[in-house]
Amino acid sequence: MKKYGERKTGLIIFIVGLVIGVLIARIFKGFYWNELDLLNLSYFNLIVNMEIDYKLLRSYVLWKNFRNYFIIWGLSFTKIGITSIGLVLIFYGFKAGFLITVLIMGYKLKGISLLIGYTFPQFL
């Protein structure tokens, strides 16, 4: 039996979540497609014209990211650490696969540019 390192195993688990997200987005499109209100032009115009409190936004984003980091770090000392890391990787893979699929189904080629320019920097 071939042994994989931690990075390859994590990447495989992430890709499994990604594939599950793509499949769920394609299979259950009829349940959510007509209910999506975020894919219209008025939503993007609302974002452009919105007043943003940047200090509050920065502290919210930093706390949200560090909170998740500290939870996983704390769980890594327990027996459920590997399981929780695997579940987090599957969850993020599912989110990425679902989002990519919905944007490409909704915007076709523009969906890819929307991912690169609008959504991808949010994950950094």
Image (spheres, rainbow, N blue to C red):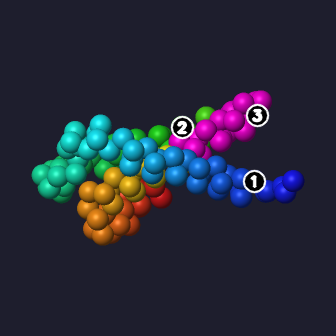
In the picture, residue 2 is in which quadrant? Answer: bottom right
Q: Nearer the viewer, mark 3 or mark 2?
A: 3
Residue behind mark 2: 67
Mark 3 or 2 closer to N-term?
A: 2
The amino acid sitting under disc 3 is Phe
Q: Which residues are magenta?
A: 72-91
Residue name at image x 14 percent, y 56 percent: 41
Number of marks: 3
Residue name at image x 45 percent, y 51 percent: 22
Q: Secondary structure at mark 2?
A: helix
Q: Nearer the viewer, mark 1 or mark 3?
A: 1
Q: Residues within 10 Å of mark 1 (few under 14, many from 20)?
A: few
- Up-down: is 72 above or below 108? above
Residue behind mark 1: 6
Q: Residue furthest right?
A: 1
Residue 61 coordinates in the image, percent (x, y): 42, 45
Describe residue 97's horizontal placement relative to residue 70 as left or right: left
In the picture, residue 81 is in which quadrant? Answer: top right
Residue 83 coordinates in the image, percent (x, y): 69, 35
Q: Secondary structure at mark 3?
A: loop
Q: Nearer the viewer, mark 2 or mark 1?
A: 1
Residue 75 coordinates in the image, percent (x, y): 69, 33
Residue name at image x 79 percent, y 57 percent: 5
The residues bearing labels 1 and 3 have C-alpha atoms spaced at a distance of 17 Å
Q: Secondary structure at mark 1?
A: helix
Check residue 14 for magenta coloring: no
The amino acid sitting under disc 1 is Glu
Mark 1 or 3 closer to N-term?
A: 1
